Amino acid sequence: MDYRKTDLEHMWHPYTDIQTLEQTDFPVIQSAEGVRLRDTQGKEYLDGISSWWCVNLGHSHPHIVESVVRQAAKLQHSITGGMSHTGVIRLSKMLLNIAPAGLNRVYYASDGASSVEAAVRMAIQYWWNLGLPEKKNIISLEGAYHGDTLGAVGLGFLPKFHKPIQHVVNRSLQAPAPHCFHCPYADNCSLQCFRGMEELLRENADTTAAVIVEPVCQGAAGIRIYPPEYVAKLRKLCTELNILLVADEIAVGFGRTGAMFASDLAEIQPDLMVVGKSLTGGYLPMSAVVATDEVYDSFRQDNGRDRTFYHGHTFSGNPLAAAAAIAALEVFENDNILEHSRVSAELMKNAFMKFGGIPGVHRSTSLGYMSALEISDQAGGRNTAAVVAASALEMGLFIRPLGAVVYLWPPLITQKSDMEEMLGIFGNCLKHSLEDGMC
């Protein structure tokens, strides 16, 4: 089969310009192992973005694969509406053992957007259950990304992406984001950027159900890493104003920030925490909302009043996905992933500090196992970033720019030699693209 030709005849690719794709000799991947993807021509590519930020433990990890295969032989699916199964019960216990203290209930969905929708609906119904239906608004950050379903789009409305559907989107209130690449304040951070959030919350406290943020890093906005202290201040203010805090850890959870969860860096307990992507090691679709007992208990019947959470997904808690998630959590613990990832994370951090000094680079940043830099407008910004990514692909490194931002977000199991190879390709393509537009 001519895979590329058949693809162009039948596939509809997400976040992909059709004309550009049709003119591109894009790879068709048929296998992967560790940090390497292999296409139908036998060419290998280093996976510099963990296949859309989810394959934290690398591809084809034998323990995860074997666990899914064993599960497939005995139970492929069983609903969780009004009944349960052994795998999802075991997973729930394991997940709560590593979640921030005080989070004791797990609701399962299928992907990030569906779990965000569930979390927002839980937050709004929580106040309705308590007799405060006026608390129904959601506040988010400018530049936020929480998924592509209509409800999730309303939490992170971006005109470039969402203008054609703006007439049907219920948009959240948005606070100014802590954008450290372009901080309007002095470099000596004292979190003046929090003022906009505080003013918005105080003005709308009586009608606000929850604030939702991607803690410490706004991913799709351009890997905007910001101080954990911002999240800690937000937690304190939400408690003071009687507003729920939803932490969207879909991208940054499971070791990406150097801690198991970004909320741990801020030393806070959200009221609702949303996880996904690497929950299963990135092998099968599964996401979850982890909630406090206080939120959960508000859904109990009261004097015959029905407070049931009428929201569900066919594959909620699917046994195959649960098996993958259990295995992934076992790998995290048994292989001491967080500790072992620190060496290569430090390599990446140090390299990006040097990249930040290359003429044409506006600024670089790193946290845990993610590093990013922004190319200045004077150096071509968005266009140059695209050239860097295209050049890197030719050299065997797969990355995807975010506007003028190029970044690395590799699997946590990346070995020193593979990290050095990634950084060598990345640095060469960056330098040469800024100099003459070619790698």
Image (cartoon, helix red, strand yellow):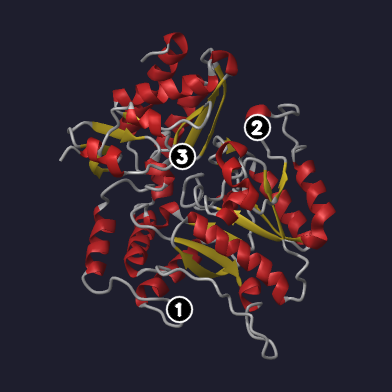
- Tell me the CA gap for discs 3 and 2: 18 Å
In this view, the mark in front (1 or 2): 1
Mark toward the start of the polypeptide (1 vs 2): 1
Q: Position of residue 168 (x, y in %)?
A: 62, 52
- Residue 121 found in image quarter: bottom right
Q: Position of residue 254 (x, y in %)?
A: 46, 52
Residue at 31%, 32% in the rendered image: 418
In the rendered image, the residue lying farthest to the bottom is: 303
**Do the residues bearing badges 1 and 2 touch, measured as CB atoms within 8 Å?**
no
Local crowd at mark 2 within 10 Å, few (<14), some, or many (≥20)?
A: some
63 left or right of 349? left
Residue 134, disc: none
Mark toward the start of the polypeptide (3 vs 1): 1
Q: Is residue 222 above or below residue 263?
A: above
The image quadrant where one finds the N terminus is top left
Q: Amino acid at mark 3?
A: Tyr
Could you say whether the residue bearing mark 1 is in a helix, strand or loop?
A: loop
Q: Position of residue 354 (x, y in %)?
A: 49, 20
The image quadrant where one finds the C terminus is top left
- Tell me the CA gap for discs 1 and 2: 44 Å
Query: 144 or 329, which lies in front?
Result: 144
**On the image, numbered disc 3 is attached to which residue?**
369
- Tell me the CA gap for discs 3 and 1: 37 Å
Residue 180, disc: 2
Q: Amino acid at mark 2?
A: Cys
Residue 81, disc: 1
Q: Amino acid at mark 1?
A: Gly
Could you say whether the residue bearing mark 3 is in a helix, strand or loop?
A: loop
Instruction: Tally the marks.
Output: 3
Local crowd at mark 3 within 10 Å, few (<14), some, or many (≥20)?
A: many
